[in-house]
């Protein structure tokens, strides 16, 4: 009889402990704010982009509610993953604004990648806005604006992206604020004129 009571007591204590654990988990999930969910989705998209996982990346994009041209964006990301070899990406969330359940994520970023036949290293930086909407309990990307963070390899996608206040202004820009060719600066220019040709000209060309 004593053994039976001990077993029953053990089972009751275990059940209470298990229930408490499950209750704690529910609290963690329910207390996760909408802002936290958006940050998590953005981080997942970042990881998929760096890992060159196109399918996983678009699991976080709403095809039905995407405000811009979805297929142009899809092709732009596909091209990015084919022509860029991402070396490093750093992002800093500046602020999050809400519009009902929607969330505007403002992000400063800097990335380095290799591209071209010679695998030239390029650095880009900017300030962008990402709009997320809650769909069936999950947040999905529905719009991008500002400096072009994703899809910068596509000129067609650049035309889809609107500018925002505070975005970086590059020396040369295309629609959407994508960096153009690097500036070439002439320094230490000198010209020596002789009575007869040739005239001597020298300068330093700095990128």
Image (spheres, grey):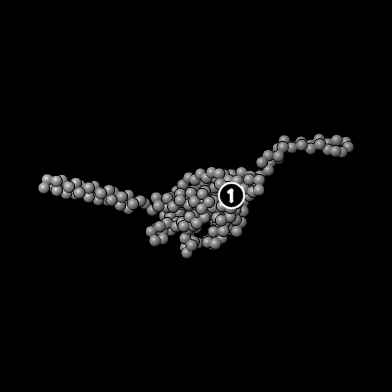
Camera-side residue of 57 and 137: 57
Asked if residue 78 lies left or right of residue 28, the reply is: right
| Residue at horizontal 38 percent and vertical 59 percent from the top | 137
Query: Residue 203 appears in which quarter of the rendering?
Result: top right
Residue 11 visible? The answer is yes
Asked if residue 15 lies left or right of residue 91, the reply is: left
Q: Position of residue 136 (x, y in %)?
A: 39, 61
Camera-side residue of 153 and 8: 8
Q: Single out the residue that lies furthest toward the right.
A: 196
Asked if residue 187 lies left or right of residue 158, the reply is: right
Q: Position of residue 175 (x, y in %)?
A: 60, 55
Query: Residue 151 appears in which quarter of the rendering?
Result: bottom right
Judged from the image, the secondary structure of the residue bearing numbered disc 1 is loop
Query: Residue 160 appears in which quarter of the rendering?
Result: bottom right
| Residue at horizontal 79 percent and vertical 37 percent from the top | 201
Q: Single out the residue that lies furthest toward the bottom.
A: 64
Q: How many marks?
A: 1
Q: Position of residue 191 (x, y in %)?
A: 79, 37
Camera-side residue of 79 and 133: 79
| Residue at horizontal 14 percent and vertical 46 percent from the top | 3
Which residue position holds label 1? 84
| Residue at horizontal 27 percent and vertical 48 percent from the top | 21
Query: Where, quadrant-wise, is the C terminus in this rendering?
Result: top right
Q: Residues within 10 Å of mark 1 (few under 14, many from 20)?
A: many
Residue 16 visible? The answer is no
Camera-side residue of 11 and 164: 11
Q: Position of residue 10 (x, y in %)?
A: 19, 46
Asked if residue 22 lies left or right of residue 158, the reply is: left
């Amino acid at each position: 009889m004593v053994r039976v009571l001990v077993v029953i007591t053990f089972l009751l204590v275990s059940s209470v402990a298990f229930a408490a654990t499950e209750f704690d988990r529910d609290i963690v999930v329910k207390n996760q704010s909408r802002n936290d969910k958006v940050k998590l989705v953005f981080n997942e998209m970042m990881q998929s982009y760096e890992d060159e996982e196109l399918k996983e990346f678009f699991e976080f994009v709403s095809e039905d509610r995407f405000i811009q041209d979805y297929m142009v964006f899809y092709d732009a990301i596909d091209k990015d993953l084919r022509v860029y070899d991402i070396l490093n990406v750093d992002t800093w969330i500046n602020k999050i604004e809400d519009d009902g359940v929607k969330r505007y994520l403002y992000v400063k970023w800097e990335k380095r990648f290799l591209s071209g036949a010679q695998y030239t290293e390029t650095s880009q930086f900017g300030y962008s806005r990402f709009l997320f909407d809650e769909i069936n309990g999950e947040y999905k990307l529905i719009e991008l604006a500002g400096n072009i963070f994703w899809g910068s390899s596509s000129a067609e996608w650049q035309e889809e992206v609107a500018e925002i206040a505070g975005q970086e202004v590059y020396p040369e820009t295309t629609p959407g604020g994508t960096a153009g060719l690097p500036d070439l600066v002439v320094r230490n220019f000198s010209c020596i004129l002789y009575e007869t040709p040739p005239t001597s000209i020298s300068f330093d060309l700095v990128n």
